[in-house]
Amino acid sequence: MLKHYIIIGLISMVPLIELRGAIPYSQVFGLPMIPSFIICIICNMIPVPFIYWLARKVLEWGKDKPIIGGFFTWCLEKGEKGGKKLQAKAGRGLFVALLLFVGIPVPGTGAWTGTLAASMLDMDFKSTVIAVVLGVLLAGAIMMTVSLMGVTIFL
């Protein structure tokens, strides 16, 4: 069982998969929902400060390097595009927009992309972390509900 908890924690930290993959995985392997939910939330948040403070700098540094340059440029463009789209839709409601962007579990959204976009928009660290935490809780609740419904439907 410990092995599965470690796996869901690691899955929660993977960009683009995050809670969308970790919570359903926990249910496929019959892990209790509440401990799984808590582990997924905590592990999904671990990379956020590093993304906020370091990702943009590392991506800027590596965008013109051979081999990694293309991927780093793609990440920068995705972050900038997400940030501009978020800001255009949100205007002054950027905090709520970031919360919803992270919280609605669809491909291309989540803590990684949301934090990178907030960093690109020079949103302050405290507001970013609070919005991302609330968004991750929302995404976790949605995925927990969907997973429980799916498990109930197929039993």
Image (cartoon, rainbow, N blue to C red):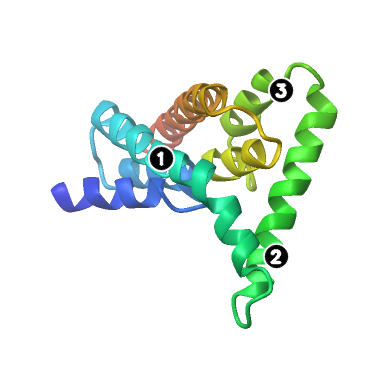
Q: How many numbered callouts?
A: 3
Q: Position of residue 88 (x, y in %)?
A: 85, 30
Judging by the rendered image, the residue that carries numbered circle 1 is 44
Picture residue at 68% right of the left edge, 42% below the top? 120
Nearest to the observer: residue 24 or residue 62:
62
Image marks 2 and 3: residues in contact by CB distance under 8 Å:
no
Residue 58 vertical placement versus 155 (above, below): below
Picture residue at 69% right of the left edge, 48% below the top? 79
Judging by the rendered image, the residue that carries numbered circle 2 is 73
Picture residue at 74% right of the left edge, 47% below the top? 80
Nearest to the observer: residue 122 or residue 4:
122
> Which quadrant is the C terminus positioned in?
top left
Q: Position of residue 44 (x, y in %)?
A: 41, 40
- Quarter of image, res 34: top left
Mark 2 and mark 1: Cα distance apart in space: 24 Å
**In this rendering, the label closer to the viewer, 1 or 3:** 3
Mark 2 and mark 3: Cα distance apart in space: 25 Å
* Numbered disc 3: secondary structure: helix
- Looking at this rendering, what residue extends furthest in the left direction? 2
Instruction: Judge from the rendering whether residue 123 lies leftward or rightward of residue 52; answer left or right.
Output: right
Judging by the rendered image, the residue that carries numbered circle 3 is 94
